[in-house]
Image (tube, rainbow, N blue to C red):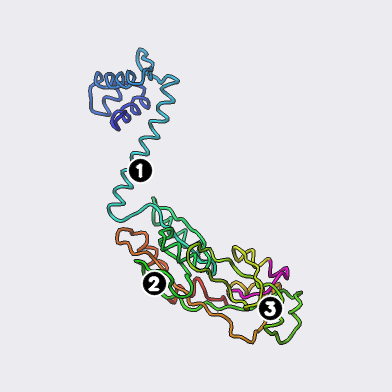
Amino acid sequence: MFSKSSLEMLDTVARLGSFTAAAEVLHKVPSAISYGVRQVETELGVILFRRLPRKVELTSAGELFMVEARHLLRQMEEIKSQTRRAAHGWQKTLKLTLDNVVKLDCIKPMVENFYQTFEFAELQINMEVFNGSWEAISQGRADIVIGATSAIPVGGDFEVRDMGLLDWVFVLSPDHPCAHIDILTEELVSQYPAICLDDTSSLLPKRHTGHYPKQRRLLLPNWYSAKECLKKGLGVGFMPSHMAQPLLSSGQLIAKDLPDNKPLSQCCLVWRKDENHQLIEWMVDYLGDSDQLHRDWLKTDA
């Protein structure tokens, strides 16, 4: 209904309060400005400006119109900028998925660096559990996954970088019945619920934290709730070493050895191949090589 130039003209008139002053700024004659304003008023069927002897001022309808007109102008500029950035491989949003097993210490510097580097871009951070991370990238809900575990269960056009092994420790509350037993057996441990995270995958086969075949599970959505259940003695289970260490040091949990080998999870960084998405390239470069990834996201602090 209104061109960008007509909205900019109206904005200039409203700011300067004069057809003559607006004409000077826009390099037009005052009659052209007056005619342009009148055309818009005719299309709207309302008066936007009161014509006074030496100035013009917005009517109440004009004030409302200018609020919306300026909003439209900002949107037009943003659309133009986004289109130009997209043409050069700069998307507006980077979708980052964290597998629930990773450390969160590095989120703050990562986010700060991203927002300092890009004035226009946004980060969308999501968390998934086990095969939910693979499902996220295979379905396009993630551009990058940090800490995807186990073997690759999906095919797709993505790259993978090794992050090393995630170490696990078997933990329980100091008040749990198993706490004062020196040698734990499968039969004994299986009497108590295994605290497990529920795989967020809806299509891929679900995987869960290590537990015995006859052991009932208490399935939880994240490690925050799992820690609380473990501390309250509601079950026993394996926890990533970097998460368990502070709770072991404070005495809120204790670690026990099982006769079986504890699980080890091979973790990796996964990202979508897209030559026209420079934000992915920047983030992958920022996250670093395999050693840095292991140190920042998986390694237990000394």
Secondary element under disc 2, as helix, strand or loop, is strand
* Label whose residue precedes the other's in the sequence (1 or 3): 1
- CA gap between label 2 and label 1 equals 34 Å
2 and 3 marks in contact (CB < 8 Å): no
Task: Inspect the magenta stretch and tell me whether residue 51 lies in it.
Answer: no
- CA gap between label 1 and label 3 equals 59 Å
Secondary element under disc 1, as helix, strand or loop, is helix
Q: Looking at the image, which residue sits at the far front?
A: 214
Q: Please provide percent x and percent y for residue 91.
A: 35, 53
Classify the position of the N terminus by image quarter. Answer: top left
Task: Inspect the magenta stretch and tell me whether residue 237 lies in it.
Answer: yes
Q: Please provide percent x and percent y for residue 122.
A: 43, 53
Q: Quadrant of residue 230?
A: bottom right
* Label whose residue precedes the other's in the sequence (2 or 1): 1
Residue position marked by numbered label 1 in the rendering: 78
Is 262 on the left-hand or right-hand side of 47?
Answer: right
Of labels 2 and 1, the one closer to you: 2
Of labels 1 and 3, the one closer to you: 3
Classify the position of the C terminus by image quarter. Answer: bottom right
Q: Quadrant of residue 26?
A: top left
Q: Which region is colored magenta? A: 229-239
Q: For the residue marked with disc 3, what is the amino acid?
A: Ser
Mark 2, other Cα within 10 Å: few <14 / some 14–19 / many ≥20: some
- CA gap between label 2 and label 3 equals 36 Å
**Viewer-side residue, 302 vs 81:** 81
Residue position marked by numbered label 2 in the rendering: 160
**Viewer-side residue, 247 vs 165:** 165
Indicate whether 187 appears above or below 268: below
Residue 190: give its label: 3
Q: Please provide percent x and percent y for residue 220.
A: 62, 64
